[in-house]
Structure formats: structure tokens, C-alpha cells
Image: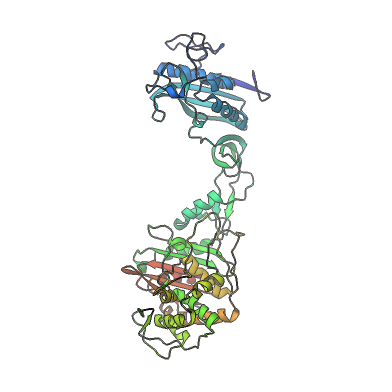
Amino acid sequence: MIPCMNRAVKVGLAGSGTVLLFLAGMGAYNVASGLVPGFGADDGTKTGRGFDLASVSSTPPPNDKAVEFAHSFLEKWSDQQLGGAADATDVPHTASPALQGYADGLRLTKVSFGHVLAAGPSAVTKGATKVTFDVTAQVAGGTWSYPSAVAVQQSTDGALAVHWNNSVLYPGLGDHDFLTAGPLPPGAVPAEVVAGDGRTDLSAFPSLRDITATIRKNAKPVAENTGTGVAVVDGKGRGVKTLKYFSKGKPPVVTTTIDARLQTVAESAVKDGHLQGKPAGTVALDWRNGHILAVAHTGDDGDIAINGIKSPGSTMKIITSAALIDRAGLTPGSTAPCTATVTANGQVFHNDPGVSADSGSTLAQAFAVSCNTSFIKEGFHHLVHDGDASALHDEAVNVFGMGSWSIGGGVATTDPSIPPDVHGGDQAAQFIGQGKVTATPLFMASVAATVRNTGFEQPIILPGQHQETAPQRISAPTAGYLQLLMRGVASGGTAAPRLHGLSGVGAKTGTAEEGDHTNGWLTAYDSRISVAALVEGGSSGVDSAGYVVRRLLGGS
């Protein structure tokens, strides 16, 4: 019996069989004395202590010498002669506390080693011979067995040493990681990330697999008894992973805001046959509280639903209209002539095909048919003063909450952008969602939600996550006017081919030019949810994103 931390520790060492005395071509190995040539022997052979790291030989030691030396190192370790074991390494001052930490963290009562065999030159440690072995450790909660290995190197003057790193304790263990046994610590057991119903595993949805992995890594799960076993913990005591279960409890759970049924609809909607395989992304929100109910996407460029930063086209006319109402006093009945073209800052703008000129058009009529020239003319006239075109940016920030959002769980989202200092033609282009204006389906779903809710609620995916607030709440009259405008789009305007007949729906379509193609947008709300969809390469909002939004509104 050898004392260790006031506990009795049993020890043992086994080779291919149970061996206490063996011949290794260089003499006898004396277990009782622990003496072996090259390890504390009296024959003048050097040991690991004092190993000169500057004179490591590039030639690996012979297999028999490497095995013999590894046997000696392991015997010291199993005898809990940790100082002696550390002395056999190339960095005793590092190895000694690490070996002690292994014993303490695991609450070790016995450790033995078997099948100590040479495996030839190490592929990792240059100039070393790899020696493999099996470990059996009696730790808190049970018996833990695993295969391991060390690299034995030699110096130019013949000294041998075990090359030390934390992988000697357990293969792949990081320099700042530790082992523990007993009740499994938080983080060691993978959390289940589930929908708002508390049951549905989000990783079952293709669009949510990356989001699920991120939340699992970063969120704080609700945990009860997660079981016992052996785990890796980091320097702050947080669980990294479980290596061995002795008893399994209940996995910790992170509950999200996702609606499992609506997510199923969204996964299907972005693959609608009308889209012909074009990349698509959609987000659905509960407009009353900002809870993210569904996120779905296709394509190879990541999650375009929350990170597809594109010009939003005419969906931006919702914010433009809000600015015209709030800052210029316009109403849905205000005159907003729809001309064939309009020139602003020397740049000529035109309407999409199919939009007829109407000199007597009102703001409501221009919104319903998505007349670009009306919004450029009214925006440039009322919202640009002495070259200052920051009014649209200010409306987006102050009323619609545009800024940097954290939706929870470490899930990254891309921020929209309406620059406050635009110049030239961009001063006009911004009012129709072109130029330097960019947005995501997540943001545009929030814009529709703000209108329907008569107030901004920052989107979140974890209940209780902090929500940023907008500096000012949208006024009831402004929200009422915008709802009137959006209902007109859904019932008889550009979104009517997809949304006509749905009750309580307001919408806005968008078609944005990007390089040699266009992207289709549509954002809408009904009595429960707000939705936005983007289809890259969509010929128009209604004939691409419209199919996605229709299925979500129909499934809400």
C-alpha cells in the first residue's frame, strides 16, 4: 500500500500476460526495487531527469529499450511514485503536477497498465519510438479502461525520456484540459436542443442543424441528474465531453422558440417546385413577442434566412412609407404620382415591367402596384434635405429597431444596413431598397411584425433572451396607415396572385436587381405570424418568394 492524498492506492503492471519479472535483452527488470538500465540505475546510464531538450537525437531509440523505459515509467506511475514518473519525462516540472491532477481529478484508487508494446517510430514526435499500452483505472464511480501511448525519445548522449504532453494521461487531452470522475459536470453531456413543445429535437430539421450545434455549444441548458462517469473539463471547470458513462441520467435540455409544426412547413416551402431549385430562405416570427418560429433555407452559401444579406428591393417601401408618414405627414391618400421615369441626382430610375404611369396616383395606389418612381420622387423630395439623406436610416433604427441583434445561443446573424451618409444616386435608390441598402429575411420579417404589432420586438430564438428595444415605438396612426397599405398589396396589389383570399393578411413584394439577375422578396403578416422570404434568382417577389410565404401563412 502506498499513501496518496490520505487514500490507500493499489497498484499493478502487466505486460502481454501478468508479469512481475521479465528479460528485455539488457538485463533483469526488478519490480521490487524499480531499477532498470536507463531509469535511476546505478550503472551510470542517464535518466529522464536532466534530459537535455537541446540535444534530442533524430534517431528513435531501439524498440526494446523504448519498451523497457516505458515499463519503468508506467511502474512508477502505477505505484503512485509520481515524482519518479515525472523524472522519466523530458519536462518533470510539468509532468509532476499533471500526474497528480490525474489522480486527484479522477479520485484514483488504482491504476494498472498492460500490453506494453513497441509500435515503431512515432508519426507525431520526431526522433521518438511509439510505445502503446492499455490503461485500467479504478476511479470514482467505477472502472475505466482505455488504450494509450507514449513517445520515448533519446538524447545524443544516450539518455532516454518520455516526451510529455497531456496526451500521456489520455489520448488527445489538451494542454489546458483535465479529467474528472463522478457526477458529470455541466457541458460534458451534450444538451438536447428542442422546439417550444419541449420534445422535438431541432437537429431533425436540415435547416436547423448548424443552429442546433451552436446553441448546444453556447446556451445554458436546464440540467437535472446527468449521470456519472469520466469527463474532460476545461480550465474553468466546464465540461467538454464525456469519455465514459457509469450511470446515465437525463440529458440537459435547451428549449427554443421554434414551432415544430411551422418549421416542418418552412422546410418544405423553401423547396417548393415553383422555385426550380433556386436558393431560398425564410423566417417566421410571432409578431407579438419576436419569437422566431421557423427558419429554413436551401442553397450552398450558408443560412440565407438569417445571413443572406441582399438588397431587399421594394419591401423597403414599408420603411420608406413610414418615414414619409412620420416625417412628412403623408397619408395613404396623399398624392404620389407614378411616372414612367424619374431623375434624381443625375440618375434615371424606372419602374418594373407592367407598372403603368398614373399622374394621379395616391401613396396607397403606388404602394399596391409598387411604383418605384413614386417613392423615389416623394422620398427624394421630402426626406433629403441639403444633401442629408439620413432620414430613412433614422426611421429604420429609431422605429424598426435596425442594429446589431443577438437572437440567443451564440447564433450569428448578419445585420441589415441603411447607411446614413449615402451620396449620389444612392440617395434616391435607397427608397426602393437598392443602392447600398441591404437586409435579410430575418430583418424584413421583423419589419412586418413591427407594423402588425404596433411596436418593435427584437427577434429571439431562446425564451428569455435579452431583446434590444427601439428608441421609439411606432405610432398607432402610422402603424394603422401601414397596415392599410399592406392589406391593399395582399388583396388587390402585387401580392394578390399568391395571397388573395387569406384573412387578415398584409404584405409587400420586392424584386431587387443584383448583377445580371434579380432576387425575389415578399414579407407579410396574418393574425398570428409575420413572414419574409428571399429567393435568389427569383424573377419577381410574387412569383418566387410568394409561393414560400403563402405556404407559411396557410400553415400558421
Does residue 34 appear anywhere in the picture? yes
Outermost residue, left side: 516
**Residue 549 picture quarter:** bottom left
Marker count (numbered): 0
Q: Residue at x 59, y 48 (%)?
A: 252
Residue in the foreground of this view, choosing between 416 and 250: 416
Query: Looking at the rendering, in which quadrant would you find the N terminus?
Result: top right
Identify whether 45 is placed above or below 375: above
Q: Position of residue 161 (x, y in %)?
A: 47, 21
For this rendering, which residue is in front, 420 or 78? 420
Identify the colour scheme used: rainbow
In the image: residue 192, left or right of residue 549: right
Q: Residue 428's x, y, as percent?
A: 42, 77
Camera sees residue 367: no
Q: Splitting the image into 4 quarters, where does residue 245 fall?
A: top right
Outermost residue, right direction? 6
Q: Nearer the viewer, residue 119 or 550?
A: 119
Q: Position of residue 443 (x, y in %)?
A: 49, 67
Q: In this rendering, is residue 218 above or below 419?
A: above
User: In the visual, does 536 lie left or right of 488?
Assistant: left
Residue at the far bottom: name it.
360
x, y percentage for residue 326? 55, 80
Residue 481 lies in quadrant: bottom right
Q: Is residue 112 above or below residue 509?
A: above
